[in-house]
Structures are given as structure tokens and as C-alpha cells.
Image (tube, rainbow, N blue to C red):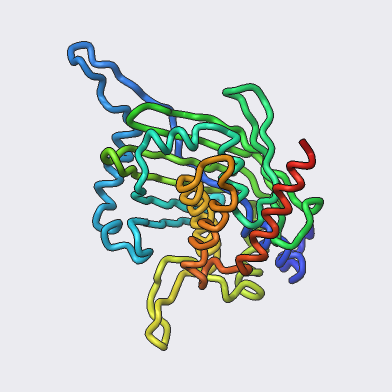
């Protein structure tokens, strides 16, 4: 990696393209369950209580969301990197979400819906699984060019009131590290649940500089979802730069969860893919990359390769 404070354009283009597709975020902490010695029922775990309080705090924003559904997206530049958070009310019971997302192999099916995630492998004993994601910097690059993200997979909480799943990777490509992905969910009623999907990673100073250079030049047309004002034409002016980057990634991965919950069966891969693509195409300014036929052909190729390798 060059030590120059102004990396060449080709290097920054490759760097930020890779970062644009990488995966990440953190939220989970320890699950604290205190048993009541005098009451017949135990109190709700503190993490579930915190998520329920978040739902109440965001209720007005969810009810008036610009996404056309109860979804709220937040982003922040942390001291060492980036973080994106998506909050959503979904039409799925918590028991259904837990059944679909507690297994590490299920998460491979979820994450490979993303157009740049071309392969996913699970290894290790139950409770200590590693989930390795193979990510290409552009959808048309071969699998041989993919970088690997090995995530430690853990179900932090799985109760009738609360689900929390964590994926953590200590190191990533091109000077990135501390990848964290977390999904939390609580039941709102018998039909609906509240989800929090969190995504983050750290990057060193050179990576930050290179990414900012790319986003100011080759990636200057890329925007996120947060509206920061209006254009001279009176249209929404969306956030750009590093926060725009993490917002695009957070939304792409939230849409993988959304698509999987609609069609979790092993024989419904193409239905999930069509759902993910349709979800992304609702926001073409931010997320459009290829046409549907190209996307489905890539995913079909991936499935055939995995089938041939068994």
C-alpha cells in the first residue's frame, strides 16, 4: 500500500469499490436475565427492554418514514470507522424470525443475496461456527478475485421475547478491521416484530483518505438515504461521502434479511433473489447496479458452482 498522502486514482477506485461491498456492524452486549424470587414470571431481559424503548422512541419516525414502510436508517462516522443502523417493523412473528435466522447456514443464504457476495461457507462445531463470506469488489469479477471475510457466528439471545445474532470479523481487506454485524428482534404482537440491524467496521487513516478521495471523484454521484437539504431544483439532497457509503451497505443487507424472511425455504432461492432485487430497485438513485436478468444469472451460476462442488 502506498504511503503517499494522495493515493493514485486507480488505487482509490479499487479500494472504495471493495469497501462499498464489504460487510459489517456491532451492537450486542451481554444478555442479563434477572429472575424474580417473588413473581411467577421472570422480567423481560434488559436487551429486549432496551430495544422496546428504542421502538417507542422511533415510533413517530417509523409511522412517517420516507421509505414507504416503517423503516428508519441512521448512520455515523465513529472514531475509527463507520456504522449504519436500520430499524424496521416487519410483518413476521418473532418465532418465525427466530426459526429462520438462528442457524449459521441460514445466514449464508441471507448474505449471498447481495450481488457482490459470491460464496459463503460454514465451518466449526455448533456454537463455535465460522462463516466465511467471499466478496468481489464488482459483481462481474470472478470468484478467484474475491476477498474473504471470516465471521465468528454467535446466537447471543434466543428467547420468546428476544432474538440477538452476532457476526464478528477481526480483520478485513485493504486496511479494514473489526467488522460487526448484529440482528436484534422483539415481538410487537402476534403478527409483527421490531428489528434492529446494525453494521460497522473500522478503517485506518490511509483507507479513510483513499475512500474519501474516491467518493469525491469517481464516486461523486453516489448518495445515501439521509436528506440533508434540497437541490436547486427543489429535489431532496441526499448525504454523500462516507456516511452515504455506509447507508447504502446497511440498506442492501437489511434487504437481504427482508427477502429471506419472505421465502426462507431451501427451494425458494430464486424467489428470495427476485424479492431482494425488487427491494433494491425501489431506491434506484442509491442502489441500482444491474438489470434483473444479469443478477439472476450470476446467482444461478453461484448455485451451480456450489452444487457441483458437493
Quadrant where the C terminus sits is top right
Q: Residue at x 51, y 36 (%)?
A: 166
x and y percent of residue 202 in the render? 59, 48
x and y percent of residue 291 in the render? 62, 69
Q: Residue at x 40, y 70 (%)?
A: 227
Q: Residue at x 54, y 51 (%)?
A: 272
Q: Is residue 13 above or below residue 161?
A: below
Horizontally, residue 198 falls left or right of residue 310, namely left
Q: Nearer the viewer, residue 253 or 7?
A: 253
Quadrant where the N terminus sits is bottom right
x and y percent of residue 188 in the render? 28, 41
Q: Nearer the viewer, residue 211 or 46?
A: 46
Q: Residue at x 72, y 68 (%)?
A: 6
- Picture quarter containing residue 45? top left
Horizontally, residue 295 falls left or right of residue 256, namely right
Q: Nearer the viewer, residue 286 or 289?
A: 289
Q: Residue furthest bottom?
A: 233
Q: Residue furthest right?
A: 144
x and y percent of residue 293 in the render? 64, 65
Amino acid at each position: 500500500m502506498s504511503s503517499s498522502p494522495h493515493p493514485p486514482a486507480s488505487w482509490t477506485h479499487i479500494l472504495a469499490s471493495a469497501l462499498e461491498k464489504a460487510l459489517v456492524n456491532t451492537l450486542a452486549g451481554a444478555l442479563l436475565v434477572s429472575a424474580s424470587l417473588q413473581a411467577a414470571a421472570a422480567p423481560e431481559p434488559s436487551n429486549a427492554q432496551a430495544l422496546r424503548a428504542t421502538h417507542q422512541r422511533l415510533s413517530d419516525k417509523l409511522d412517517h418514514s420516507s421509505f414507504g414502510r416503517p423503516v428508519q436508517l441512521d448512520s455515523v462516522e465513529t472514531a475509527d470507522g463507520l456504522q449504519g443502523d436500520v430499524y424496521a417493523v416487519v410483518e413476521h412473528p418473532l418465532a418465525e424470525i427466530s426459526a429462520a435466522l438462528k442457524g449459521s447456514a441460514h445466514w449464508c443464504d441471507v448474505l449471498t443475496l447481495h450481488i457482490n457476495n459470491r460464496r459463503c461457507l460454514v465451518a466449526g462445531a455448533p456454537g463455535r461456527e465460522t462463516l466465511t463470506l467471499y466478496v468481489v469488489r464488482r459483481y462481474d469479477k470472478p470468484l478467484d478475485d474475491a476477498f474473504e471475510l471470516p465471521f465468528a457466528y454467535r446466537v447471543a439471545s434466543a428467547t420468546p421475547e428476544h432474538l440477538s445474532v452476532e457476526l464478528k470479523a477481526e480483520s478485513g481487506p485493504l486496511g479494514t478491521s473489526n467488522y460487526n454485524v448484529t440482528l436484534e428482534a422483539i415481538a410487537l404482537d402476534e403478527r409483527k416484530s421490531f428489528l434492529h440491524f446494525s453494521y460497522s467496521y473500522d478503517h485506518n487513516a490511509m483507507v479513510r483518505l483513499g475512500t474519501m478521495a474516491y467518493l469525491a471523484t469517481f464516486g461523486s454521484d453516489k448518495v445515501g438515504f439521509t436528506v440533508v437539504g434540497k437541490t436547486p431544483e427543489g429535489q431532496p439532497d441526499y448525504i454523500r461521502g462516507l456516511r452515504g457509503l455506509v447507508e447504502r451497505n446497511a440498506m442492501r443487507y437489511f434487504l437481504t434479511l427482508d427477502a429471506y424472511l419472505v421465502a426462507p425455504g431451501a427451494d425458494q432461492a430464486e424467489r428470495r433473489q427476485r424479492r431482494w432485487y425488487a427491494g433494491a430497485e425501489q431506491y434506484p438513485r442509491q442502489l441500482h447496479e444491474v438489470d434483473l436478468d444479469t443478477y439472476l444469472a450470476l446467482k444461478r451460476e453461484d448455485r451451480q458452482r456450489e452444487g457441483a462442488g458437493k
